Image: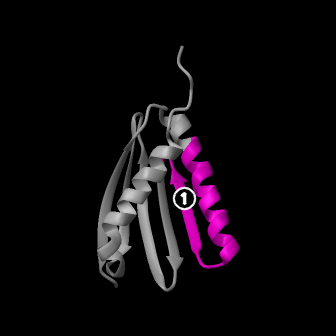
Amino acid sequence: MSLMAPITISIPHNLGKAEARSRLESGFGRVRQQFAQGGAINMQESWEGDRLTFSMKAMGQTVSGRLDVLESEVKMEVDLPNIFAAIAGTIKKRVQREGALLLEDKRRTP
């Protein structure tokens, strides 16, 4: 069993659960397609209610995690292999930035 470096990410949103989940589903679908084209990653995901459990395997390393869609935020826990511990901060910032863009409320208010 390999050691893990867990990171926790919280991404606030104003979309409500249903819209946030819909965007996350399509976002994960795009990620899966991008990585599948290169053949470098084996990605699996499973929704149970508003919780997504996922894992990705690339270069002999597995990254897994859980994502909970709440009414006004998404909470994500990612288990990184220790080999990625040195870049965990960078990974966390990128996931937060990409998640915020995905969950940005683009609806216009009068």
Element type where label 1 sits in the image: strand
**Range of the magenta residues?**
22-50
**Residue 45 vs residue 10: left or right?**
right
| Mark 1 lies on residue | 46
When the figure is inspected, residue 55 is found, relative to residue 101, above or below; the finding is below
The image quarter in which residue 64 lies: bottom left
Residue in the image at 39% along x and 65% along y: 91
When the figure is inspected, residue 41 is found, relative to residue 107, above or below; the finding is below
Residue in the image at 67% along x and 64% along y: 33
The image quarter in which residue 42 lies: bottom right
Judge by depth and name the residue closer to the eye, 5 or 49.
5
Q: Position of residue 36 (x, y in %)?
A: 66, 71
Q: Amino acid at mark 1?
A: Ser
Judge by depth and name the residue closer to the eye, 89 or 10.
89
Residue in the image at 49% along x and 68% along y: 55
Residue in the image at 48% along x and 54% along y: 52
Q: Position of residue 82 (x, y in %)?
A: 31, 79
When the figure is inspected, residue 74 is found, relative to residue 4, above or below; the finding is above
**Residue 97 vs residue 88: left or right?**
right
Q: How is the image coloured?
A: one colour
Q: How many marks?
A: 1
**Residue 4 vs residue 74: left or right?**
left
Judge by depth and name the residue closer to the eye, 38 or 54.
38
